[in-house]
Amino acid sequence: MRRRNFLTATTGTTAAVAVPLVAQHSVGTSDVIRLRSGVDALVALDAARGGHDELERMALAGAAEALEKQKLGASQRIRQRLFSVAATYMCQAAWSAIDDKRTDRARSLLERALYLAGMAKDPVAEMQVWNLYSSLSHHRGAYTEAVDCGYAAQATAIARRDPFYASLAHVRTALAHANLGERHPALRSLGCAHEALGKASLDDPRPIWTAFYGPGELLALTAIVRDKIGESVKAEAASHQALAGIPKAFRRNRALATARLALTQLHQRDIDQACATASTVFTMMSGHPIPGRMRSLLGDYHRDLITLAPDAGVAREWGDRYRTEWSRA
């Protein structure tokens, strides 16, 4: 399966993703490759467990090592590649903070990542930063800013050249428009996202951070857009399709899509089914702490539940389960 072999042997242990230290020497391509392999391991850990302090710490250690090696680069080309690696590590640290709902921390990390991407002259790293900025703005409730970041992502050289990246930029823009209640711009951007991904060659080599995105993830994001603009039936259908397409190795993403499915069912007043679906999120994340972003989404579900069905027995039962799981997370 494209770009996803790296997940098959991952156990999620901290020891497996430590960035190795090597003796000082003239820095070249082998160092760049070694450092990039550390990013691969961090992405695998994120896919299984989600954002957390230790992941951020390891990502920052990788960025620091890349920047130290940059000072010893054998050529300008190698130095720029090391800036690119450092930017990718910094983005991974920022994403961990976003997933853990530490938005102020994430913003400061993205500011640094944007600087490093500029020093690297790397349009893919630049696209990664703007994609994360849009996601961060979404979670901060700064939806107009999220729209602007989505358009900045669309304007990067790689998004203009590769429809895969264009699709990701368009769906980020669609999410932001939907959160602003802008139905037509949201649907227009969503249509562009689907059209672009349909044109993309999904087997082309791309950086490992893009492994999460494909037809399944696009459908999961489509469900959010549809639900936000009041199309809960279409949102539920998209959620089911997403869960059929998101690889099982992406446990956190599948759990998020399941929570979104529960919300679409709740918004159709199917209380019993919604609560049953929402309960499976805890099972899916069993053995791992629930990341802050997922905790926030489950909190949204709980608030909607008690608003729509405050006296339903199943709602009270789910609320008890929610409080118990929350205290364990």
Image (cartoon, rainbow, N blue to C red):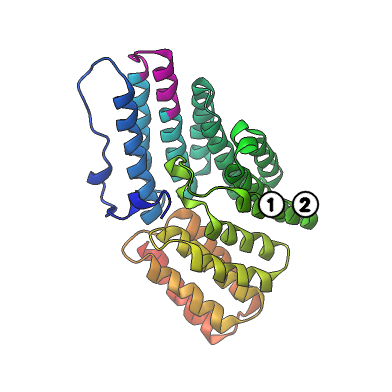
Q: Quadrant of residue 144?
A: top right
The answer to which of marks 2 and 1 sits earlier in the sequence is 1
Question: Which residue in the rendered view is the most extreme toward the left?
Answer: 23
Tag 1 residue: 174
In the displayed structure, does residue 65 sit left or right of residue 187?
left
In terms of secondary structure, what is the magenta stretch mainly?
helix
From this viewpoint, is residue 252 visible? yes
Confirm whether the magenta stretch covers residue 264.
no
Report the residue at 57% width, 36% height from top. Answer: 127
The mark found on residue 185 in the picture is 2
The percent position of residue 275, horizontal first and vertical second, equals 52, 78
Which residue range is magenta in the image? 70-84
Spot the residue most to the bottom. 313
Q: Secondary structure at mark 1?
A: helix
Relative to 160, residue 176 above or below = below
Q: Residues within 10 Å of mark 2 (few under 14, many from 20)?
A: some
List x then y, in percent, for residue 237: 62, 72
Q: Residue at x 47, y 50 (%)?
A: 99
- The numbered disc on residue 246 is none
